[in-house]
Structures are given as structure tokens and as C-alpha cells.
Image (cartoon, helix red, strand yellow):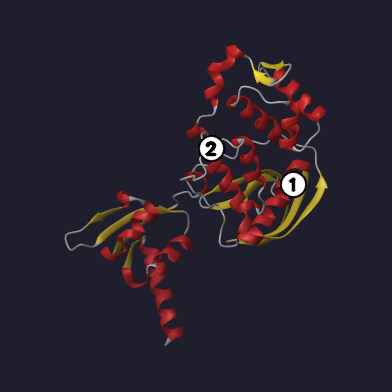
């Protein structure tokens, strides 16, 4: 991609006194004419690149611009590397690693080989997830709709959307787009959609940034109180933080927090097995009793 190549050229020029056109063409596997066009585009973007003739000549950033050579420090490059590695963990390709190689330009001082930050964004279902991300990414680039079957707590449905963004939030991957069924912007979890296929082209529309506060996606519609055994303190801290409970005189943990719906509460209480007792709301406590009796009948 042109933007990847231009970033790589800029990174090289920031690190070295000069780089020849043939060297750039060989490194990025393009023609010298393409490199000249890229350099011209960088100049138009405000980067003062000069051409030096003769032995040891080539392209260089103007002397007075040296103050900006610290634009990409070692720490900056390590942060970029960590981000690009995380994208490779779900892309199913080495596209981002290859971009990083171009950015580093073989400089061990700028980019040490042993990165200390590892981010793996892949889920348990890595292979099908990578296929979905690549297909949706291609559809976004080509302004084509995507169709799929979606599985939600309130049932199954067929959807066609105009995709705008692929987002990683709440430890999961989502596609954000204009839903032609709901006539509004919607967020769909990739692990819940199947039968994905690309549809017809669409005229791109202005897409709002998918900035979703937790309160909007997971509203506190139901306040819950429960007594939790001390051995499960780690679960409360991991999932809700230190402020979600008060330790009682007998060592029990009085938990209080908001949940989006009854299903979330029931699933959470059951996941604690016999280590928690639901206190409030009273109607849900009664329902838990009915569930417990049905489970007893089934497994006895």
C-alpha cells in the first residue's frame, strides 16, 4: 500500500543521513519512478526532503529539520511494534509485521529485537475470526455491504449492514455499521455472526465514531446484592474491582453492583456455584429458587 511505503520512507530518512533512490526501490520492491512519486508526495505534505548528487548522495531531510528526527524514538517504535503485533495476532497474515520491518529499517538501536510488550487480540476461535475480520475489512475498503445471520439474546435474525469500522471492545471483536433492517447504526459481535458474505456496493455515508461508553452498551438496569464466600474474592476483584463489595464481620463479602438484565445475573450467580447467595432483587431471588429446584429434579 502506498501509505505503508511512504511511512517506511519517512522512517528511513529520519534515521539516516541519506538514502538513495535505488536502495529505496529495492527495499520496498517498487520501481525508482514510484519512489520519486512518493518522495514528491512527502514534500507536498510538508516534509522538506532534498536530493543530493554524487557519491554517497541520495534523498535526505533538510538540515534545518533535524530537530524533528526524534519524531520516532525507540520507545515510540516499541509502542508501534506492540500495536502492529497485536493486529497480526488476529489478521491471519504477516502484513503488519512486514510494515514494522519497513518502519524499523534494520536499525537495532531504534527497534530492539526483543520487544517486551506482547498483546494477543485473538480469541479462542482464532481461525474463523481472522477470516471474518479480513472479509469485513475488504468490504469496508470497497464500500460493499455484508450480509450474515446474527445470534442475539432475543433471537436470531438475518442482517445486511453497510460496515464502517471493525472495533475491539470488552474483550471481543465487533463490526460497526448502518443496519438496513433497523435503519440505524449498530454494533455486532463477530463471534455471534455466521454465514458472512459480501453484498452490493453502497454510497459511503458519514459514519459517527463508534464511541460507546460501558453504561450505554451495558446499562445498570438491575441492582444486585449477594453474599459471596471469601474464597471467591478474586472473581469479584477481577470482574468488578475492589469497590464492589464490603467485607462483613463473619468474613462474607457483601457484593453490590448493577447488571444489564436478568440473564446476566442468573448466569453470573450460577457460575459461582454454591459460593454465593443472591439477596436482591427479591423477585430474582425467587426465580433462582425455582431454577435450583428444577436443576435438582433434573440431576437427581
Q: The N terminus lies in which quarter of the figure?
A: top right
> Where is mark 2, residue-wise?
108
At horizontal 78% and vertical 42% (from top left) the residue drawn is 142
Using the image as rendered, state which of residue 157 and residue 284 is in the foreground. 157
Indicate the quadrant where residue 42 lies.
Answer: top right
At horizontal 46% and vertical 84% (from top left) the residue drawn is 298
Extreme residue toward the front, this view: 55
Left or right of residue 264, residue 18 in this image: right
Using the image as rendered, state which of residue 44 and residue 178 is in the foreground. 44
Q: Residues within 10 Å of mark 1 (few under 14, many from 20)?
A: few
285 relative to 69, above or below? below
Residue 63 in the image, given as x and y percentages of width and height: 60, 13
Residue 170 in the image, given as x and y percentages of width and height: 51, 50
Residue 113 in the image, given as x and y percentages of width and height: 52, 44
Indicate the quadrant where residue 230 lies.
Answer: bottom left
61 relative to 113, above or below? above
Q: Residues within 10 Å of mark 2 (few under 14, many from 20)?
A: few
Q: The C terminus lies in which quarter of the figure?
A: bottom left
User: Disc 1 vs disc 2: which is toward the camera?
Assistant: 2
Cα separation, mark 1 vs mark 2, equals: 34 Å
Extreme residue toward the top, this view: 64
> Where is mark 1, residue-wise?
138
Extreme residue toward the bottom, this view: 300
- Disc number placed over residue 33 in the picture, else none: none
Amino acid at each position: 500500500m502506498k501509505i505503508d511505503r511512504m511511512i517506511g520512507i519517512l522512517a528511513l530518512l529520519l534515521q539516516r543521513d541519506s538514502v538513495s533512490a535505488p536502495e529505496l526501490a529495492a527495499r520496498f520492491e517498487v520501481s525508482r519512478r514510484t519512489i520519486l512519486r512518493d518522495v514528491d508526495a512527502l514534500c507536498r505534505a510538508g516534509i522538506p526532503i532534498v536530493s543530493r548528487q554524487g557519491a554517497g548522495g541520495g534523498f535526505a531531510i533538510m538540515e534545518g529539520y533535524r530537530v524533528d528526527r526524534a519524531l520516532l524514538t525507540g520507545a515510540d517504535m516499541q509502542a508501534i511494534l506492540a500495536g502492529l503485533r497485536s493486529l497480526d495476532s488476529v489478521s491471519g497474515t504477516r502484513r503488519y509485521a512486514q510494515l514494522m520491518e519497513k518502519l524499523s529499517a534494520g536499525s537495532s538501536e531504534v527497534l530492539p529485537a526483543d520487544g517486551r510488550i506482547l498483546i494477543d487480540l485473538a480469541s479462542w476461535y482464532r481461525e474463523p475470526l481472522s477470516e471474518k475480520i479480513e472479509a469485513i475489512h475488504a468490504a469496508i475498503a470497497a464500500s460493499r455491504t455484508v450480509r450474515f445471520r446474527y445470534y442475539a439474546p432475543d433471537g436470531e435474525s438475518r442482517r445486511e449492514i453497510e460496515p464502517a469500522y471493525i472495533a475491539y471492545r470488552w474483550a471481543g471483536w465487533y463490526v460497526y455499521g448502518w443496519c438496513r433492517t433497523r435503519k440505524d447504526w449498530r454494533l455486532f459481535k463477530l463471534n455471534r455472526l455466521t454465514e458472512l458474505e459480501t453484498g452490493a456496493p453502497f454510497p459511503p455515508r458519514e459514519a459517527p465514531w463508534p464511541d460507546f461508553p460501558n453504561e450505554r452498551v451495558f446499562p445498570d438496569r438491575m441492582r444486585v446484592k449477594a453474599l459471596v464466600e471469601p474464597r471467591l474474592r478474586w472473581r469479584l476483584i477481577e470482574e468488578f474491582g475492589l469497590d464492589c463489595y464490603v467485607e462483613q464481620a463473619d468474613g462474607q463479602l457483601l457484593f453490590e453492583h448493577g447488571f444489564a438484565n436478568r440473564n446476566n445475573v442468573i448466569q453470573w450467580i450460577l457460575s459461582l456455584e454454591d459460593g454465593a447467595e443472591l439477596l436482591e432483587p427479591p423477585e430474582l431471588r425467587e426465580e433462582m429458587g425455582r431454577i435450583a429446584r428444577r436443576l435438582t429434579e433434573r440431576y437427581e
